[in-house]
Image (cartoon, rainbow, N blue to C red):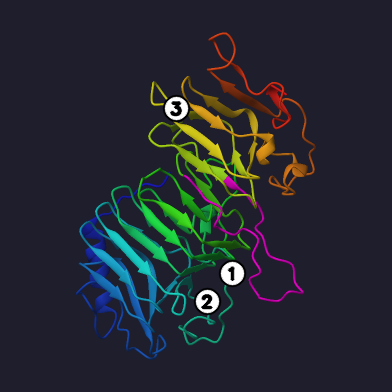
Amino acid sequence: MKTVSIRAAALAAAALVLCLSFSSCDLLGLVGVDPTDDALYAANVDTYSGTLAGNTTFAAGRVAYVTSTLYVPSSATLTIKPGAIVKFATNEGIIVESGGCIVANGTADARIVFTSIKDDSKGGDSLLDGAGIPHAADWRYVWINSGASANSFAYCDFAFGGANSEAVLYLDDEADVSHCDFHDNGGGTPGDESDEAVLHIRHWKDGTSVQYNRFWNNRWPLAMPPQLSLGNTNLFWVDHDGDPGTAPAGNTYNLIAIDLSELYIDAVDVLWSEDEVPFCVYEGMVYVGYEGNDHILELGTDTVVKFAGVSAGIWVDAGSTLDASFANGNILTSIKDDAADGNDSNQSDLAAAAGDWWGIWDADLGSGSGDYWPNDDAMVFYAANGE
């Protein structure tokens, strides 16, 4: 899990050195080089690094070049206007600290772009070097820290990020993410606790929403806590080039991983209804309900949940409900079961077998002590306990 340690004196010293290195420096809201220095950058480039001094706006039609990690501090808002382009130096990113906020609301006709400084297709040749060839994992992330609320990303493109097996957009607190494209990013490998998905939601917050987004050519598109509801509006197979002669593009590990940093569905009823790719639970249990907080986990039509590891499963507390059925097209199965939904979720040729995962325990079944569920329903495959 990410942690932040900012030494104000070190940042101030770095800012002073940077300012003295160039002819002028904007200290009112940013630390950076002179955006008009044509010898270094294209005329439409403004540079940013260090800690913002207050509310700051990235303007439409400009390239905001983040030369080293940029911090949005408490009580400050970074507003990114429709049509703005944010480019990152190698291995750099934006960190929104507790109490800070980022609002990046583009429009269908004026999208906001987060990309590599090497991406000359967006905003031109910013470094004036004629050598722009971007790659996945060129830059790191936009990271929303715990306590940074009311964040918003609409009609944004995130490309060529995810260095160091990290997320491109990492949420420790609430954000509304809609109509965004995530493509050609790095990120980590699902099942590795130190790795992150391209959009990685670590903690459930009531104000977080993920809808109408598209994911393609990423390593691993999405991770989310079990208590987040996810509808069927996001796309994981995308006709990104508009050419009917080419196949839609997916992702290497085309799945939604359940992040078990939080185990319990104990505050709201939850609906998982994505049907293009499976929800995947790795080693560990999802608990539906907890200590008298009765809730429902409902699976939408044709929703598949896969499990990886002998301790992976779902525990349904007394009074709570897992609403799933074979008649509704739901399947609970091993991550090795490619036939369940046509997705090679673990990129492996290993065949599924009984005992691949733990099973489903329902405390309301049996003679008051619970039972593995449903023992006689063909929707459960390859569990150690159950069918």
Residue linked to disc 2:
118
* Residue at 69%, 37% in the rendered image: 327
Does dot 2 land on a helix, a strand or a loop?
loop
**Which residue is the site of mark 3?**
289
The answer to whether residue 276 of the structure is visible from this angle is yes
Q: Is residue 139 above or below residue 147?
A: below
352 and 108: which one is in front? 108
| Residue placed most toward the observer, 383 or 12 | 383
Residue 137 horizontal side relative to residue 250, left or right = left
Q: Is residue 207 left or right of residue 363?
A: left
Residue 240 is inside the magenta segment: yes
Residue at 70 percent across and 32 percent down: it is 379
State the image coordinates of residue 249 (x, y, percent, origin top left).
Answer: 68, 64
Amino acid, disc 3: Gly
| Disc 2 to disc 3, C-alpha distance | 48 Å
Check contact, mark 1 vs mark 2: CB within 8 A. Answer: yes
Q: Amino acid at mark 2?
A: Lys
Reading the image, the residue beneath label 1 is 135
* Quadrant the N terminus occupies: top left
Q: Is residue 38 left or right of residue 273?
A: left
Find residue 351 and name its label.
none
Q: Please, which residue is most extreme toward the front here?
A: 327
> 114 above or below 298?
below
Report the magenta residues as a range: 229-256
